[in-house]
Image (cartoon, rainbow, N blue to C red):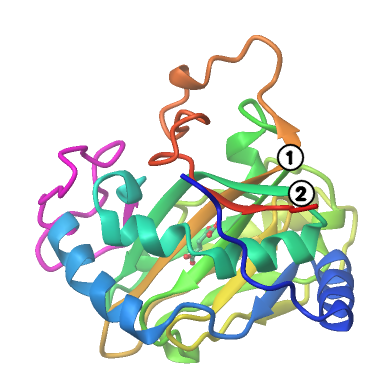
Amino acid sequence: MKTENLPALPAEQKRTAAADFARDGFFIAPPLIPAELLARVRPRIDAVYAGEYETGIPPCGSPKGSSVPPTSLVKIDNTHRSDRTIHELVSHPAIGRWAAALTGAKTVQVFATQLLIKPPGSTGAGNVGWHQDYEYWDYALEGDVFTAWVAVSDVTAESGPMRFVRGSHRWGLLKAGDFFGGDLGAIQQRILAKTGGAKWEERAAVLAPGAVSFHHKLTVHGSGPNLSTGPRVSFAIHLRTDQSRFPDGLKWETVPYLNDPDDMQGSPITYRETA
Ligand SMILES: O=C(O)CCC(=O)C(=O)O
């Protein structure tokens, strides 16, 4: 598949966005995904949740919390391999363009995705415990890896938006988080105990449908209960740049969430620098 870059972002916008990302460890971009694509994606999410796989390829791993309707956090890995419209969303060039602007990458490639559904009224069962993404990937990928998170629903303050801890990407790899831990307070204490007195400053990523946040592999983040009336629906898109590599000897096939880096269905390239 050929990567079609969008026109470059203005130089000043790129410069300030990259500086914000470097300082805070996250960046909230304006809405990037067209409303018509979001409208096409929503029924495809329902289809995949119901076990209908357009390409015949099932998502990786078993869906978490797959009661109908869900009552706890749903996390389904690599649904972009199962459905062409979801693939179109996660490989959208507007995400690649911003990812490259923030990181200075020459190439941006998807290496894994997660469909996340946080049902309303899920209380602690819908929480995402504080964690750093790299605590789950450090054995599988080295170098520049990070995450884009796309709001499919309207992610309001009440819906349990993702919360970033500002500057925590400078705390090092702590290995004190727990994605599936519901007790945010206890995990926060465990993380802080490893920092030697760091300041904990949270920012909620309230996002309109189609808006995208980006976070560094070491940024501490998590989210609380969905107190709104509808599900909070999103995709986490895990990205790597040309400055990343599988560690010597690692076979990507042995890592459940990794996709073949040469297969553009599993690992689409969403940005490639042109001369
Ligand atoms: O959806 C959330 O609240 C957290 C998602 C997450 O951990 C991630 O995108 O890395």
The percent coordinates of residue 257 (x first, y second) are 43, 35
Q: CB at mark 1 closer than 8 A to ligand 1?
A: no
Q: Tell which of 16 and 137 is nearer to you.
A: 16
Q: Quadrant of residue 96?
A: bottom right
Q: As drawn, is 44 to the left or to the right of 93?
A: left
What's the amino acid at mark 2? Lys
Say whether residue 70 is visible: no
The alpha-carbon separation of the residues under discs 2 and 1 comes to 6 Å
What's the amino acid at mark 1? Asp
Task: Say which residue appears at 88% left-offset and 79% top-offset.
Answer: 16
Q: Tell which of 180 and 146 is nearer to you.
A: 146
Task: Report if residue 66 lies within the magenta region.
Answer: yes
Q: CB at mark 2 closer than 8 A to ligand 1?
A: no
Q: Tell which of 4 and 83 is nearer to you.
A: 4
Task: Say which residue appears at 31% left-offset and 44% top-offset.
Answer: 81
Furthest residue in direction front, as rendered: 275
Give the magenta part as a residue range: 49-76
Q: As drawn, is 126 to the left or to the right of 192?
A: left
Task: Report if residue 63 lies within the magenta region.
Answer: yes
Q: Are marks 2 and 1 in contact (CB under 8 Å)?
A: yes
SS at mark 1? strand
